[in-house]
Every structure is written in structure tokens, then in C-alpha cells.
Image (spheres, rainbow, N blue to C red):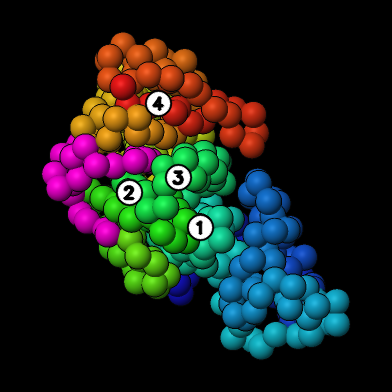
Amino acid sequence: MTGAPSGAGDTPVAAQGVTGAGELVRAGAATLHNAHVPSPRVDAEALLAHVLDRELPDLRRAMVLGETVTEADRAAYLRLVDQRAARVPLQHLTGEAHFRRLALRVGPGVFVPRPETEVLVELALTDLRAAGEEPVVVDLCTGSGAIALALADEWPTAAVHAVELSEEAYAWAAANVERSGLAVDLRRGDATTAFDNLVGAVDVVVSNPPYIPPGSVPVDPEVRDHDPELALYGGGADGLQVPLAVAARAAVLLAPRGVLLMEHADVQGEELVRRLRATGDWSQVTDHVDLAGLPRVTRAVRG
């Protein structure tokens, strides 16, 4: 990335001659604070660590010791700060998003995994423990591959399968599968028709489908302007058109007593539970909150 986009925040004048790592981070954090970036200090440190190719603890030591950076690294850092001030996602600038124990490659064209999705992984691990030594897992709408890869990483005996419709997102997921070395059967295709070879044989289906209602445009510019619309909007008046179609496919794939775990918006928990119960395909339909205490994941058992 060689230049700041239109509308980027102005770099503080003090930063122009700054070469100390600590001073540079403080100047960067000031720029991000003025641009209303939610975590200016954290992002400023992450960007300099990325430019210098150093781990955060190592960078913080360098800051305490008063280490300086080269002119080229300073210029590269200030360009990234300007782009982050323009609300380009931090993960797009570093090319990496952390999820569970994994560092995933992400960028334009793929949904950046969020911490709130980790509760879905925790719930899935509980159900995998109950499913036996070699459970079969399917991730419908895998995006970057975050959920599928986390499960393959933390439950190595599981047979993990994943599917993604978007060509761009599939490319990111494929890169993550290759980079991780984890055994995930990744396919490109429609989640509502995928895996004919697994009908009735799956123990757990996980999904973080598009679910935002059409009129509910995200407030955060990082999401609104940079996450792909295909990964955001669920269709229908309530945003549940795609989630319900994915759930219908999950009902076909799951063995009796198999489990569906599906993420949703915090305002959709009650309605998704009601709609799933109404299909007659599911029993024990319950909703679970995320770490912030907000409704986040619906769990349903195949009847």
C-alpha cells in the first residue's frame, strides 16, 4: 500500500521528524484517536509491529528502550496510520486476523472474523465431545475458514468439511487451509445444496451465514464499507432468508440427534428460535449469548 486514500486523517506535525518507536506509536495513536478509531493505541502498536515484522512484546520492549526506526519504515508506518484513520480495517492493513489459536489471512472480499463468533466454536466443541471419537463437521458459509479451521485445530480427530460461495472469500479460505496445514475439506459452492455425499451423516453443522436485515446498514465503516455485502445481508424483511435456507440444508445433512449451531444478529435470537421450531425439523432449540451477554448463537437438535 503506497498511499493514503482520500479522506485519510492528517498525520500530526510532530510525527514528521519522529524516528523513535515509542514516539511514533504515540503520534500514530493521536491520529487514530482524532479519527475516532475505537482502539487507537492498540491499532497504532499493531501497525508498527507489522511494519517492523516484530511481535508486540518485542515492539513494546523496543519502545521502552528508545529504539529508532529507519526512514523507510517510518514512512511506511505513517501511510498505514493514514489508511487506518480513513477506517480501512486493521486486518486489511496487516493482512491478518486472529481467531482462537489461529492467525488467518484476510483482506478485501472476505468477512473479517469477529471475537463474538468464538462462542460458536466453544459450543461446537462441547457437542463434538458428545459425538464420539471421529465426528463429522460441516461449516456452511465458511468465509475465511475461521470456524472450520478452529475446529480442525482444536478437535484433530474430527472430519471437517467447509463450503463457500464467493470466489474471493474461497480464495482466502483456501490460502488459510494451505497455510495452516489443517485437514479441512474445502469446497466452493452453494451452502444450500452442498455436500450431497454427506446427507444424513453429519454430527455437527456450524454456520455464520449472512444475516443482517436489508435496512440495517452497519454503523461501523470498517464493516459497512469493507466487508463484502454477500457476507452481510441475509435477505428478506428480517434478514433470516439465507439463515433459514442454510438451516434447511443442515437438516438434510445431519444425522438424527445431530446439532446445528448458527450465529445471528443480537436482535434475531427469539425469531430464529421460533422459526426453526416451526419447521418441525428441530427439537431442543435454544439460544446462547456471546461474551458481551448479547444473543448470538442458536443451537438446534435434529429431530
The residue at the point 34 percent across, 41 percent down is: 203
Marks 1 and 3, how far apart at CA: 10 Å
Seen from this angle, which residue lies furthest right?
Answer: 65
Q: Secondary structure at mark 2?
A: strand
Amino acid type, mark 1:
Glu
Amino acid type, mark 4:
Ala
- Compared with 155, 241 (above or below) is above
Seen from this angle, which residue lies furthest bottom?
Answer: 70
Q: Secondary structure at mark 3?
A: helix
Mark 2 or mark 3: name the one nearer the start of the chain.
3
| Mark toward the viewer: 1 or 3 | 3
Please check the rendered image and state whether residue 204 is part of the magenta-colored stretch, yes or no: yes
Marks 2 and 4, how far apart at CA: 17 Å
Point out residue 200 in the picture as x, y percentages from the top left corner.
Answer: 21, 37
Mark 1 or mark 4: name the one nearer the start of the chain.
1
Rendered-image quadrant of the N terminus: bottom left
Q: Which mark is residue 128?
A: 3
The residue beneath circle 2 is 136
Give the left or right position of residue 111, taking residue 115 as reference. left
Q: Secondary structure at mark 4?
A: strand
Seen from this angle, which residue lies furthest front?
Answer: 132
The residue beneath circle 1 is 154
